[in-house]
Amino acid sequence: MSLLVNSDSYADQALKEKIRDELKNSLGKQFSIEDSYDSVRNKIIQNLGMIEEISETAARKAKLSYDVAARFGEFEFPSIRYGGLVLPAGKYQALKVTISATFTPDKASLQ
């Protein structure tokens, strides 16, 4: 899972952690270590709407007006270390949730 937030600000990073925890609590129960790749992928795709809803609710509770988009697909990732595990840079199948500031153009910028 990849969560991309609007900025590196404390509030945005706290929101990112809150969304991660909410998604793990809400969706984690649906997955088992015995699940096949296809089963996991299908469960994620079937729940993209719920993933966006959970993320949007967390943003609203934090009083942040952000757009949320959840997608499952192949995405480019940099090399990353998780404890003793190192994943090389490359393209990986993942759930990607993007949380970004809402942009509403004013009338003057449309002319």
Image: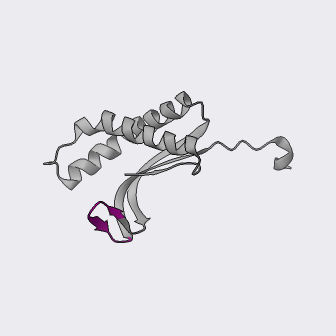
| Residue in the picture at 22% in, 42% down | 31
Figure check: 20 above or below 36: above
Q: Nearer the viewer, residue 18 or 77?
A: 18
Residue 24: image location, x then y, percent: 32, 39
Figure check: 30 above or below 100: above
Residue 20: image location, x then y, percent: 40, 42
Tell me where the magenta segment starts and ends, as one range.
Answer: 81-89
Q: Tell me how the rendering is colored.
A: one colour
Q: Nearer the viewer, residue 48 or 3?
A: 3
Q: Nearer the viewer, residue 15 or 53?
A: 15
Image-quadrant location for residue 101? top right
Residue 43: image location, x then y, percent: 28, 43
| Residue in the picture at 26% in, 64% down | 84
| Residue in the picture at 37% in, 38% down | 21
Image-quadrant location for residue 12? top right
Is residue 42 rendered to the left or right of residue 111? left
Q: Is residue 34 magenta?
A: no
Is residue 68 rendered to the left or right of residue 18? right
| Residue in the picture at 16% in, 48% down | 33
Is residue 79 rendered to the left or right of residue 59? left
Q: Residue furthest left?
A: 34
Residue 41: image location, x then y, percent: 28, 51
- Tally the marks: 0
Figure check: 64 above or below 100: above
Q: Residue furthest top?
A: 61
